Amino acid sequence: MIPGDDDMDEPDRRPATAGVHAIEVEGLQKSFGPTPVLTGIDIVVDPGEVVCVVGPSGSGKSTLLRCVNRLEEPTAGRILIEGADITDPDADVDALRSRIGMVFQQFNLFPHLSVLDNLMLAQRRVRRRRKAEAERIARANLDKVGLAERAGAYPAHLSGGQQQRVAIARALSMDPDMMLFDEPTSALDPELVGEVLEVMRRLADEGMTMMVVTHEMGFAREVADRVVFMDGGVVVEEGPPGRVLVEPRHERTRRFLQLVR
Amino acid sequence: MRRRQRQRLVRGLLYASFLAAVAVLVLIGDWETVASEFFDLDTARGMFPEVVTLAARNTVIYTALAFAFGLMFGLLLALMKLSPIAPYRWLATIYIETFRGLPALLTIMLFAFGIPIAFQWQPPFGFAGAGVIGLIVVAAAYIAETLRAGIEAVPKGQVEAARSLGMSPAWAMVSVVLPQAVRIVIPPLTNELVLLIKDTSLLALLAVTATTRELTNFARVELFDAANATPLVIAGALYVAITIPLTQLVAVLERRNARSR
Ligand SMILES: Nc1ncnc2c1ncn2[C@@H]1O[C@H](COP(=O)(O)OP(=O)(O)OP(=O)(O)O)[C@@H](O)[C@H]1O
Ligand SMILES: [Mg+2]
């Protein structure tokens, strides 16, 4: 059993639903060659829940997130996306991925396409939307991240904060059921962090299911429903941010929090 | 100060010796012979218009054919070489290493003489056709390596972003990776095109018909007919006239690309 399981007796903020979990990670292990990186992870994310994953560098947070949409192939364990096993060899991975938005630390916008085309490409190819519809949805999402007037720009002509907001809008244009964020503000100049966090905060308020790897403790404290602290490839403890981030039970968590503060 | 002076002295000496060499050449050179043997107007006049309408035209056609098909097969080979399926990789590697290792002339002779003799095969359009096939086979090997390098130079995050949006590997390749790879490989591909233009001269060693002669072959026949070197100068000038606009056009394309980044 993972440490911190005893947190489960704390009152859940959301009513227990009979429906399936949005994300269910069961006994996930991942090694790169002989090097074990994840050694048995169990995490559940419910629909509408915001889970922040924190932990020291190299603890396997990115690897965990990348396993969830199978950008990394798990070595062992199962990952269910709304009940469907994405680790199943027969799973329609492309279809499952199209329901999981992902935002990367390095933005990964397509540099050869305009902002609008960045948002329309997968809508057209994967969702098979007609051009007019794809453009309407793209513009609505650009508007949502406050970049409606930059539709014609190329990524290289945008600031880092604008690029990351475009990346979020690109993911949202697929109408995902959940969003994964891997340190979305770590590559940004400090003065640009706020605008991206603001967009994420609004997304959380709208009820988006989110799994966020972040070093922004303020964001985790205010926005997360639950915080997961990882170290050395395992979940050390998890629970409401008010508990994990303020009065952690484990020494490792305490030390980590002292370092990032 | 002393270093500057010494540099100026060295440069002055270099100029002086260059001028002295030119002066010696002018004094002892047999300029009448040079003019009549390399720049004979009557010989030159006798070559026109066929040297352009036939020979240069054929050179351009052979180059265009070899490049277009070389690009097609080269792309196929590059994708095979990057394929997760091992036998495809092996096939591509064997092909590329073989035809980059062999002298182009040997490959051309293989298709012009070797295979026709062995299999009673009639190459389309005779020796010229066989020669162009040989050029395609060689060009594909070089172009494949260039394209593979270009594809690999596109950051991995680009494919991951495309896949995380639900795009299939094929769509990610076609609409995200290849457009970026093409920009990267434009300079080395131009190089290969220029090399290919010059490689068409290898067809001069095949006994092609009068109407399928390219520039070098044409110049060689004229050289022996007139017992005069002027045809080599004319052919050389035409090669340069073909390659310079090409390299300039690509420079313009590159600058336009750079601006949209
Ligand atoms: N493709 C890979 N091949 C080999 N080792 C890898 C690979 N990806 C990650 N690792 C290793 O796995 C470990 C965990 O990496 P991961 O990126 O998941 O950590 P992280 O918690 O996201 O760290 P950070 O906060 O620095 O992003 C690290 O030791 C890393 O070196
Ligand atoms: Mg990471």
Image (cartoon, helix red, strand yellow):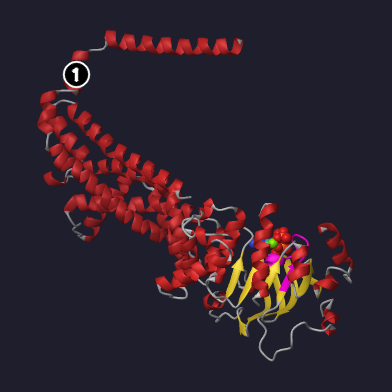
Q: From this viewpoint, is residue A222 visible?
A: yes
| Local SS, label 1 | helix
**Residue found 29% across the figure and 43% down from its top:** B197
Q: Is residue B212 left or right of residue A210?
A: left
Residue A8 picture location, percent across and down = 82, 83
Q: Is residue B50 left or right of residue A261?
A: left
Depth check, front residue: B78 or B114: B78
Give above or below for B230 relative to A109: above
Q: Quadrant of ligand 1?
A: bottom right
Residue A177 location, quadrant? bottom right
Q: Does residue A55 belong to the magenta stretch?
A: yes
Give above or below for B147 relative to A146: above
Residue B28 picture location, percent across and down = 27, 9
Q: Is residue B50 left or right of residue A251?
A: left
Q: From this viewpoint, is residue A170 visible?
A: no
Residue A41 picture location, percent across and down = 74, 75
Which quadrant would the N terminus of chain A be assigned to in this image? bottom right
Residue named by callout 1: B35
Q: Chain of mark 1?
A: B
Residue at the far bottom in the pictured view:
A18
Q: Which residues are magenta?
A: A51-64
Name the residue type under label 1.
Answer: Ala
**Residue found 79% across the figure and 83% down from its top:** A12
Which quadrant would the C terminus of chain A be assigned to in this image? bottom right
Q: Does residue B161 belong to the magenta stretch?
A: no
**Residue found 32% across the figure and 9% down from its top:** B24
Residue B150 picture location, percent across and down = 47, 52
**Residue found 55% across the figure and 64% down from its top:** B161
Question: For mark 1, does the 10 Å Cα neighbourhood hold few (<14), some (14 to 19), or many (20 or more) residues?
Answer: few
Residue B34 location, quadrant? top left
